[in-house]
Image (cartoon, coloured by chain):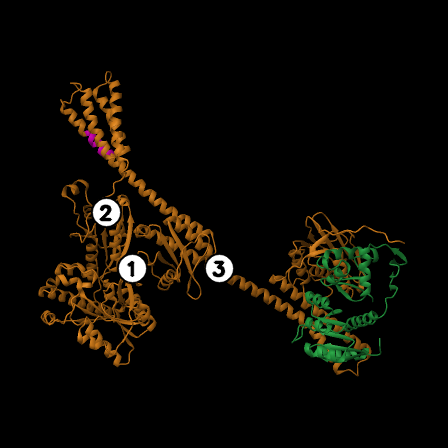
Chain colours: A green, B orange
Amino acid sequence: MSQEATILLIEDEPEIRRFLRTTLPSHGFRLHEATTGQDGITEAKARNPDLILLDLGLPDLDGSEVIRQVREWAHIPIIVLSARDQEQVKVEALDLGADDYVTKPFGVNELLARMRTALRHASRANESGEPVFVLGDLNVDLGRRQVFVSGKEVHLTPIEYKLLITLIRYAGKVLTHRQLLKEVWGPLHVDEGHYLRVYMRQLRNKLERNPAHPRYLVTELGVGYRLRTE
Amino acid sequence: MNQKRPDPDALLTRVQAEEAGHQEGKLKVFFGANPGVGKTYAMLQAAHEQRRDGVDVVIGVVETHGRAETEALVNGLEIVPRRAIDYRGTVLQEFDLDAALARRPAVILIDELAHSNAPGTRHAKRWQDVQELLRAGIHVYTTLNVQHLESLNDVVAKITNVRVRETVPDSVLERADDVELIDLSPDDLLQRLKEGKVYVPEQIQHAIHNFFAKGNLIALRELALRRTAERVGQQMEVYRLAQAVVRTWPTAETIMVCVNMKPRGPRLIRAARQMAAGLHAKWIAVYVQVPRHLRMSQSERDRVIHTLRLAEQLGAETVTLTGEDVAQEILAYARSRNATKIIVGKPMRAWWKEWLFGSVVLDLVNQSGEIDIYVITGTADEGQPVARRPLRSTGDASGYAYAIAGIMMATAVDWLMFPHFAAANLIMMYLVAVVAVAIGWGRGPSVLASVLSVATFDFFFEPPYFSFTLSDMQYLLTSGVMLAVALIISNLTARVQRQAELARYREKRTGVLYAMSRDLAINRGTGMLAQLAAKHLRDAFDAQVAVFLADADRKVHLQRGELLFFELDPKESGVAQWVYDHSERAGLGTDTLSGASALYLPLVASAGAIGVVAVRPKDSVLLMDPERLHLLESLVNQVALAIERTRLSDEAQQAHVKAKTERTRNAILSSVSHDLRTPLAIITGAASSLAVGRDELDPTARGELAQSIHREADRLDRLLKSLLDIMRLEAGVVQLNKQWHPLDEIIGSALARLEGWLRDHAVNTAVPADLPLVPVDGVLLEQVVINLVENAVKYAPPGSAIDLSASASDREVVVAVADQGPGIPVGEESRIFEKFYRTKHARERGVGLGLTICRGIVEAHGGRIWVENRSRGGALFRFSIPLPDQQPPVETEQPEAREA
């Protein structure tokens, strides 16, 4: 990461803009603001920010339309700010290429954590793959395709392994059911959500100390899964 | 003084009449004795006067008959265009009622009130058009000749020997607001006739000499003058009543006139009307249906209907009674209605028949007591007596054969008995045969049998044997007795049969009424009632039936359903609408819109018409029977009442639900406003002290204030979420997004979201790794787990553990959340799931919605939720989700071990 990351905030609610305007600079971010979707797209093209915070309830454009247009030319990480009970909207945004979402009302800590994850992931995508992934007592040797929990090797089936490395590749980021099914089972199985749930359970049973209260393999009900990295 | 005060009822009637007068148009009649006296001329003059005063006057119909003076007066007045009606190839120019109603003038001129409209117009008679105009609030000027008055029809016919077919009910003239008599002396009229100034109606062309004979003219003029004078007298009385100048007021009399199928019915009716008018009496036309009337011929039936309808038109109330004895029925009814006079026709039977069989008139006179009986003579107006359809016409021929056979059998038996028994006993055998034949086959065959028995007895058993010689007067008597027995028995039998027939008919009628009222009573909903009504009416009248109900805009709509069938063209629904608007029957068999294919009856409830019933019988004559019409009317009344009842109860129900919703809303508002204000007060207070005393506050205090703002905002957020959830659940808009979920994953997700809450508590989970998948809405079920754990946290002492477990059986998966708090007060185990319910032990105030939401979600999934106290203290909440028979298919892999 360079010194100061540039953030573009596309949000029509002035109080939320003000709250972020006062908070984000003190955490090392430079903030640009846009109040409409159209302005946001123009600003994004002009400033090429490191990350976009996008409100889904904009007055002029549908938030998903903004994602679609930005994704046509750039892979800038996008974090969606959405109201509660809009699982479908979130999933749609994520499927279109948004990197993460934060549900309103949100605390600063939560937002900062998501922003850092998204920025880190974006910078890592440019690096060559790391040979070993370490998270707590979980240790995955990607070169040898071996998985260790607390130093003990765990045997995974091919699908379990493929599921795990997909989550690792996007570590910290929420992956929708559709994205995971497409990556692991292929594009023909994107609607068979229960496959995914059954294999996630197997994976939790093998990797988590308490599968009913997981630390790494987190379920975002109605949306998808995330490999928690903090 | 007291008795000089006007009767309040009478005053009220007068006020109502005046009020009705304000809404309805006024009728002015230019009344004359003959054609040619100048009625139309006078009417046009009056119209011009009105027009000069600025009144909007138009001509509906004026017949000038080519008279120049009259035509001159037509000029300058607006004329409503006539309507061309094609009637059997001839184009008739008829008055256009709808155009007149649309034009809405203040005054309209309608000439020749007695005119009959061409078929295809709405009303059969022009006076009905006028009534509709009046109802629409339009004043009408019209002309009428005395010979067209219904009650004077007979008198005029007698005077002039010309029967006028086109008549107007007297009530129309009586209800007129103004009658202007156009009088011309007979000499002047004859003079005008000679000068060719008088148009002569076609129908009396052939009788012109008779009609315009001076004697006739004088008589007609007297009739017209008398009629006008009568009217003036009535008005005077009305005035006297209003002005409290009551002096003599005869007690209201009631006159009853009895009619039957005889052709002189109309005469009786007219006589009764005249008497009633003279006495200001109410009058009732009564028809008694006795069993033998059930086999009336069609024309007799028609005549009864026509007579009763005439009575109705002349202002009578009509009643049909059923019974065995005409005189008794009439007298019983007369007494029940306090009738003082009864009018009957003089019997026209031969004297000996009357002497032998008695007559209704004789019975009436003998038994009437205080009631006066008026016997009216008269020849039939029209028609010939009609042959009666015999009872059992088909069985007759065979009856005679049986009579012969019966006597042959009796003879055979007697032949065997002859050597051993006396002659009197042999006769007894014949008597048995005669009685049997009389019972079985009626009068004719039994007479034959009695004659035959005397003959055979004489031939076989009376010396000289095998020859007919009535040697002894004794056997003449025997023969007479046998004949008498045969007649008595056969008459008795016929009577019993007729009674049975009547009883069957009554039973059927009662049965229909009962079946329908029962069905209407146990069913609800106007659509359902309409269907039931249609079904019963269809069965009872062998007819197609349709029910129309009116909507809030007073438009009628056909109630559709599998039992309702009616080919409907716009014209027919127009008739239904008309019937609804006017609350009058119309269509088939009536004088109004008689071109319609069905009879339309209004459904009249206590607050006016609510709809229309259309009945289209296979045989339209069936509807002409007064008995059936009455049955139809009572059925239709029942339907109207039932529909009104169900509507009222629906309204009451709605009001009740509304009140209940209102109460619930108030409870929510009062509870929620408190729960919203508390966190808002804390936030406002903390935020304002942060804003104002920034410099004075030390960092710790600032941190605490910020913390409490955060905490309270969080609480507000949860409260709002709960409220939204409960509203959505209650409104029924929650759509379950069911997918196959492992419950352990839902529990895990819930615990992840609860992390902030669970700092002070350890959560022990006991969830098997192989729980079956359940088809649930994951997001909602997660909410259930979150709410249950939050609830446990609220009650459990800090540091205590919360136990979360799940188990599966064949039929369901059960999730349990247990705490170590105080438990649930005994008896409140189910109440705690109610809205806004809170126990006293909560450490932290909640809204009291969390558990209600849980119950709503679990029940939406077909599961149960319940609570009990643990044996070692604390509450144990459990909910179950039913398991389907089969799990979804999941492709399994080869469990492949990776190389170590």
> If you read the primary sequence from the N terminus, does the residue marked by circle 3 or circle 2 appear first?
2
- The answer to the question of whether label 3 and label 2 lie on touching residues, with beta carbons closer than 8 A, is no
Residue B768 position in % (x across, y down) = 78, 52
Q: Name the residue type under label 3.
A: Asp
Of residue B671 and residue A89, the one placed in the foreground of this image is A89
Going from N to C along the chain, the mark reached first, 2 or 1, is 2
The residue labelled by disc 2 is B327
Left/right placement of residue B564 relative to residue B675 reads: left
Label 2 amino acid? Ala
Q: Position of residue B891 (x, y in %)?
A: 75, 52
The quadrant holding residue B400 is top left
Would residue B472 appear left or right of B315 to someone viewing this image? left
The residue drawn where x is 75% and y is 75% is A52
- Region in magenta: B481-489
Regarding mark 3 in the picture, which secondary structure is present there? helix
Q: How far, Cα to Cα, is label 2 from label 1?
A: 33 Å
Residue pointed to by mark 3: B650
Per the model, the C-alpha gap separating discs 3 and 2 is 49 Å
**Chain identifier of the residue bearing label 3 in the image:** B
Pointer 1 residue: B591
Mark 3 or 1: the one toward you: 1
Residue B136 visible in rendering = no
Task: Please tell me whether mark 1 sits on a helix, a strand or a loop.
Answer: loop
Q: Callout 1: 10 Å neighbours few (<14), some, many (20+)?
A: some
Q: Is residue A6 visible?
A: yes
Residue A229 is situated, as x and y percent measured from the top left of the image, at: 83, 66
